[in-house]
Amino acid sequence: MVLFARGSLALRKTPRAVESFKVSGTLTSAVNYCSSTPALPLGSFVERFWQISDSAPHGKERIIPSGTIELVINLHENEFRIYNLRQPTLCKSFSGAIASGAYDGAFVIDAGQHASAIGVHFRPGGAFPFLGASANELADRHVDLETLWGPAAIELRERLCVARNPSERFFLLEKALAAHLFRRMEHHYAVGFALSVYGRVDSRLTVRDVAQKTGLSQRRFIQVFAREVGMSPKLFCRVRRFQQALELVRRVVAPNWAQLAVEAGYFDQSHLIHDFQVFSGISPTAYLRQRSERVMQNHVPLVS
């Protein structure tokens, strides 16, 4: 066991087992995807390491907000292009190692650039100890990882590119996170309580309710929450409710939208439709037509 002085993260000398599967059932056009959840305490902040390979059969994908932050490294080329959802021909170019902040709406990626990519999917608020910046500074933004980690980000990508397999790459990601613990791996007590409450589908506590229970003013609670999570508590609850609706949609072929809306915590179907438009840029019926098993979770093939 190797212990790192900057924080309480214990790093294993051998990587954990990797879960691997085909996102599609056909071998020729499948997207190969594998993932691994790190052990505690890191597993309380990182939901999974993931790797994807093989090109999807479409050019671009929209990514729907999840209320979380992601680190993504392109193993094929040293570039990422992020497109504007409303003007898909316009894009911003970044290096091949980026941090994707918590978004309040969908954005578009070049699916070909994810033909060989690896990443860290943090739990809500989980990226905060490793950023060197407040999570709300990355809100609705992509940032070169080098901006946050310096030359170490370039070195990390180079090592990931030459690593032999996903297990080895996931181990390198663990080492990189351990080397960039800018803060202790713990949430502000109010943020930890709020995340546990907001994680329950049946929770009806308002922002004011949670602030009162934590002994903070509403304004102070919103500040500390946004600093660690990257968005306000109210917006986070809306995004997570929308994610719950998407999870229910994934389980059925032909959803009963009115019933699904109630199960996900919406007042009625019209509110669900509104959030679909706000967070994904498409209607529920359009989402059903465009969704695919050949893409990662929260990714939808972009249809012209």
Image (cartoon, rainbow, N blue to C red):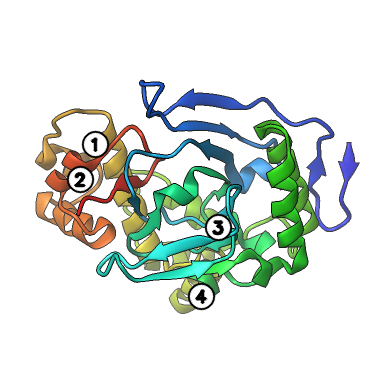
Name the residue beneath numbered marker 3. Answer: 125
Residue toward you, 152 or 251: 152
Name the residue beneath numbered marker 2. Answer: 287
Tell whether label 2 touches label 4 (CB within 8 Å). no
Name the residue beneath numbered marker 4. Answer: 223
Residue toward you, 6 or 59: 59
In this rendering, the answer to whether 302 lies above or below 95 is: above
Residue 69's label in the rendered image is none
Q: Earlier in the sequence, mark 4 or mark 1?
A: 4
Tell whether label 1 touches label 2 (CB within 8 Å). yes
Q: Earlier in the sequence, mark 2 or mark 3?
A: 3
In this rendering, the answer to whether 111 lies above or below 263 is: below
Between circles 2 and 3, the one closer to the viewer is 2
Residue at position x 66%, y 72% in the image? 147
Q: CA distance from mark 2 to mark 3?
A: 28 Å
Between circles 2 and 1, the one closer to the viewer is 2
Between circles 4 and 2, the one closer to the viewer is 2
Classify residue 38 by image quadrant: top right
Residue at position x 41%, y 21% in the image? 27
Q: CA distance from mark 1 to mark 3?
A: 25 Å
Name the residue beneath numbered marker 1. Answer: 249
Which residue type does callout 1 highlight? Val
Q: Earlier in the sequence, mark 4 or mark 3?
A: 3
Q: CA distance from mark 4 to mark 1?
A: 33 Å
Q: What is the tally of numbered marks visible in this picture?
A: 4
